[in-house]
Image (cartoon, rainbow, N blue to C red):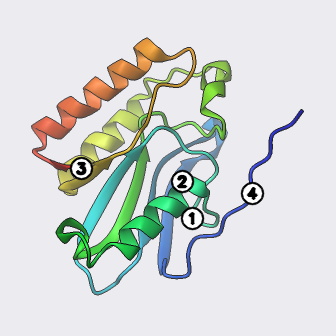
């Protein structure tokens, strides 16, 4: 039985979109979504791994994150001046079903991805950590990725939510 998920479009309030994908490796390093051109701050959100979202199409998680930030800009002071939401992932490889990540035959410790996280956390102070539980069969690796990322956030003195 093949599992399918619905297709999502980015919400109408997303004004500009950009991403850094490496097609031959089936990975995305970051996805940037501008939700308010007059707001000057950015919010970095660290998730588990990309499902299907690109600059052209959203997925459930990216749609939910951007909607939450946009709708709560007046409610939470940390979101008040957020104009750009940037999505990165602990594991950069596209896989809609995280329990299948271990079957991809890739090294989840992707050096280019770690460098991207380090670079972006040094440039964007506000960070939401929303990566969830470990993928099936990758407990040890996932714990190491989380620790490395927490170390980076501590070094860069990020505001972590």
Task: Measure the alpha-carbon separation of dots 4 and 3.
Answer: 29 Å
* Element class at badge 4: loop
Which label's residue is closer to the chain start, 2 or 4?
4
Q: List the residue tagged with mark 2.
A: 61
- Mark 3 residue element: loop
| Mark 2 in CB contact with mark 3 (< 8 angstroms) | no
Query: Of the residues tagged 2 and 1, which is closer to the observer?
Result: 2
Determine the residue positioned at 36% across, 20% down: 143
| CA distance separating discs 2 and 4 | 12 Å
- Secondary structure type for disc 2: helix
Around disc 3, counting alpha carbons within 10 Å, would you say few (fewer than 14), some (14 to 19), or many (20 or more)? few
Please tell me which of labels 2 and 3 falls first in the chain.
Answer: 2
Q: Which residue sits at x=13%, y=43%?
A: 156
* Quadrant where the image shows the N terminus: top right
Residue 40: x and y, percent?
22, 77
Give how far across and how far down residue 3 sits, in percent.
81, 40
Q: Is residue 30 left or right of residue 61?
A: left
Residue of label 1: 55
Mark 4 touches mark 3? (CB < 8 Å): no
Mark 4 or 1: the one toward you: 4
* Residue with the mark numbered 4: 6
Outermost residue to the bottom: 38
| Labelled disc at residue 122 | none
Percent of width and height locating residue 21: 55, 50
75 to 19, vertically: above or below: below
Q: Is residue 86 left or right of residue 128?
A: right
Q: Could you tell me which residue is drawn at 86 percent across and 37 percent down?
A: 2
Q: CA distance from mark 2 to mark 1?
A: 14 Å
Along the polypeptide, which appears first: circle 2 or circle 1? 1
Q: Which mark is residue 161?
A: 3
Q: Which residue occupies the foreground of this view, 32 or 119?
A: 32
């Amino acid at each position: 039985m093949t599992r399918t998920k619905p297709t999502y479009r980015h919400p109408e309030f997303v004004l500009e979109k950009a991403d850094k994908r490496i097609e031959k490796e089936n990975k995305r390093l970051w996805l940037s979504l501008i939700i308010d051109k007059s707001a000057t701050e950015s919010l970095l959100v660290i998730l588990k791994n990309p499902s299907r979202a690109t600059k052209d199409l959203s997925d459930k998680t990216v749609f939910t994150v951007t909607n939450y930030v946009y709708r709560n800009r007046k409610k939470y002071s940390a979101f008040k001046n957020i104009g750009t939401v940037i999505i990165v992932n602990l594991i950069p490889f596209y896989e809609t079903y995280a329990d299948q990540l271990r079957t991809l035959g890739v090294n989840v410790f992707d050096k280019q991805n770690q460098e991207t996280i380090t670079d972006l956390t040094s440039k964007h102070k506000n960070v939401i950590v929303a990566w969830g539980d470990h993928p099936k069969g990758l407990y040890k690796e996932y714990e190491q990725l989380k620790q490395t990322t927490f170390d980076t956030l501590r070094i860069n003195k990020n505001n972590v939510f």
